[in-house]
């Protein structure tokens, strides 16, 4: 059985739930780069969606 981490923070924004857990931390530079790239891609995806809807950014 896999043990899950503790929920450290929890946020809600519209229909999105953000849960910050303490069960995983990246340690290598390669892992850090992958996480940063994934966050960057997600951020631009959100921006593109808002622009398509006519929102001011």
Image (spheres, rainbow, N blue to C red):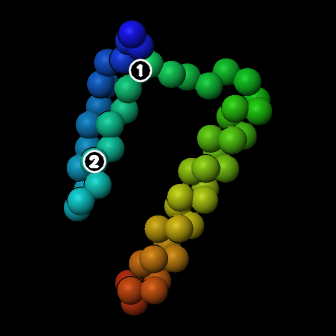
Quadrant position of residue 50 = bottom left
In this rendering, the answer to whether 32 lies above or below 11 is: above
Estimate the spatial distance between the alpha carbons at disc 1 and disc 2, rounded to whole Å: 17 Å
Element type where label 1 sits in the image: loop
Q: Which residue is mark 2?
A: 17
Task: Where is residue 10? Give x, y as percent.
Answer: 26, 37
Locate residue 9, reporting x and y percent.
Answer: 29, 31
Left or right relative to 53: residue 44 = right
Q: Is residue 20 left or right of residue 27?
A: left
Q: Which residue is mark 1?
A: 22
Q: Position of residue 16 (x, y in %)?
A: 29, 55
Please give the name of the residue rendered at 53% of the width and 68% of the height, measured from the top-left corner.
Answer: 45
How busy is the neighbourhood of tag 2: few (under 14 within 10 Å), some, or many (20 plus)? few
Q: Name, please, the residue furthest toward the bottom.
A: 54
Q: Residues within 10 Å of mark 1 (few under 14, many from 20)?
A: few
The image position of residue 1, as x and y in percent, is 39, 10
1 displayed left or right of 45? left
Q: Residue at x 32, y 37 (%)?
A: 19
Name, please, the residue furthest toward the front: 1
Q: Residue at the spot x=52%, y=61% of the render?
A: 43
Please state, as top left, top right, bottom left or bottom right, where the C terminus lies in the image.
bottom left
What residue is at 23 percent from the left and 61 percent from the top?
14
């Amino acid at each position: 059985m896999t043990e899950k981490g503790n929920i450290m923070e929890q946020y809600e924004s519209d229909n999105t739930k953000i849960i910050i857990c303490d069960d995983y931390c990246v340690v290598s530079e390669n892992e850090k780069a992958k996480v940063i790239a994934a966050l960057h891609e997600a951020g631009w995806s959100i921006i593109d969606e808002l622009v398509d809807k006519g929102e001011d950014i």
